[in-house]
């Protein structure tokens, strides 16, 4: 279980964090050989409810910011404890970001463990705040880190969002990937997306790869990175 009471944050946010019971698991993101790990995505696992239930609860309370801070500090603590040498991808709400004091505390606390190793992955919900995303982008790039868009093709993450956020990585949603080896419409769509994102210097991740045939076809299209149960489950 992740604890927050020792962190260099103000009392109000520490009191809010103390109410959470959360663990984190990690799912690898592989390079095109299907064996070499590029990064690890941190996934929140609440002790007494599902992630969706927790987010819905905190959305109703207007306390998503608490989960934003909890995810960055909690996931990074667990990542450091595991000693993974690769990058870590941490989920972030597109409607929120840590304030200046919290971001400074985060970078001071984790130091060089963060520089060049963090991927901030903007989720597809609940809504988009241009102000928060711009601040997030500035903070991320000041530490030589990367910005990612999750679940492209679902929720609010579409081509317009990519143009606005200018991420380093775009993760294609499972809906675009499932059965692509025998679905010509999906094949044409993903091929065009890969060409478009590569022309902008962005890496493309195929999410939710569950079959060998899907993986093999996507490798042929030139997709850069892969994530899904065919390769590895979260642990």
Image (tube, rainbow, N blue to C red):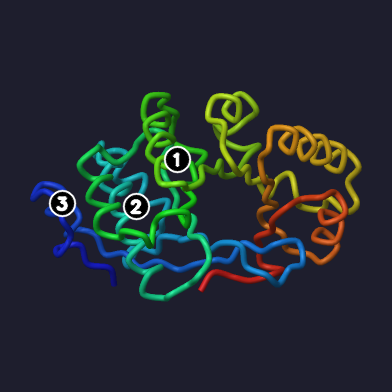
Please provide percent x and percent y for residue 101.
Answer: 20, 42
Closer to the camera: disc 2 or disc 3?
A: 3
At a point 91% along the width and 42% down the height, the residue shown is 184
Q: For the residues marked 2 and 3, what is the alpha-carbon distance in whole angstroms?
A: 22 Å
Question: The N terminus appears in which quarter of the rendering?
Answer: bottom left
Q: In this view, does 150 lie above or below 208?
A: above
Q: Between residue 65 and residue 35, name the one nearer to us.
A: 35
Q: Name the residue under label 1.
A: 141
In the rendered structure, are the residues bearing label 2 and label 3 in contact, judged by CB atoms less than 8 Å apart? no
Few, some or many residues within 10 Å of mark 3 (<14, 14–19, 20+):
some
Q: Earlier in the sequence, mark 2 or mark 1?
A: 2
Q: Mark 2 points at which residue?
A: 54
In the rendered structure, are the residues bearing label 2 and label 1 in contact, judged by CB atoms less than 8 Å apart? no
Q: Callout 1: helix, strand or loop?
A: helix
- Quarter assignment of residue 199: top right
The image's mark for residue 50 is none
Q: Name the residue under label 3.
A: 9
Please provide percent x and percent y for residue 39.
Answer: 56, 62
Q: Which of marks 2 and 3 is nearer the N terminus?
A: 3
């Amino acid at each position: 279980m992740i604890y927050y009471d020792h962190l260099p944050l103000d009392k109000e946010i520490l009191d809010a964090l103390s109410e959470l019971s959360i663990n984190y698991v990690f799912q690898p993101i592989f390079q095109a050989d299907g064996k070499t790990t590029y990064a690890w995505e941190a996934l929140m696992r609440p002790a007494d409810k599902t992630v969706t239930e927790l987010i819905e609860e905190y959305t109703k309370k207007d306390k998503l910011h608490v989960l934003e801070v909890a995810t960055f500090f909690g996931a990074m603590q667990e990542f450091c404890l595991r000693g993974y040498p690769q990058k870590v991808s941490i989920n972030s709400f597109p409607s929120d970001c840590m304030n200046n004091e919290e971001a400074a505390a985060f970078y001071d606390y984790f130091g060089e463990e963060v520089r060049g190793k963090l991927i901030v992955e903007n989720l597809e919900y609940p809504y988009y705040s241009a102000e928060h995303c711009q601040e997030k982008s500035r903070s991320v790039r000041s530490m030589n880190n990367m910005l990612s868009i999750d679940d492209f093709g679902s929720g609010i993450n579409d081509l317009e969002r990519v143009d606005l956020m200018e991420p380093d990585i775009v993760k294609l949603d499972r809906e675009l990937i499932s059965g692509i080896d025998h679905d010509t419409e999906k094949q044409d769509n993903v091929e065009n997306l890969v060409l478009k994102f590569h022309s902008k210097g962005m890496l493309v991740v195929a999410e939710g790869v569950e079959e060998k045939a899907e993986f093999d076809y996507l490798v042929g299209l030139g997709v850069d990175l892969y994530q899904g149960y065919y390769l590895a489950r979260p642990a």
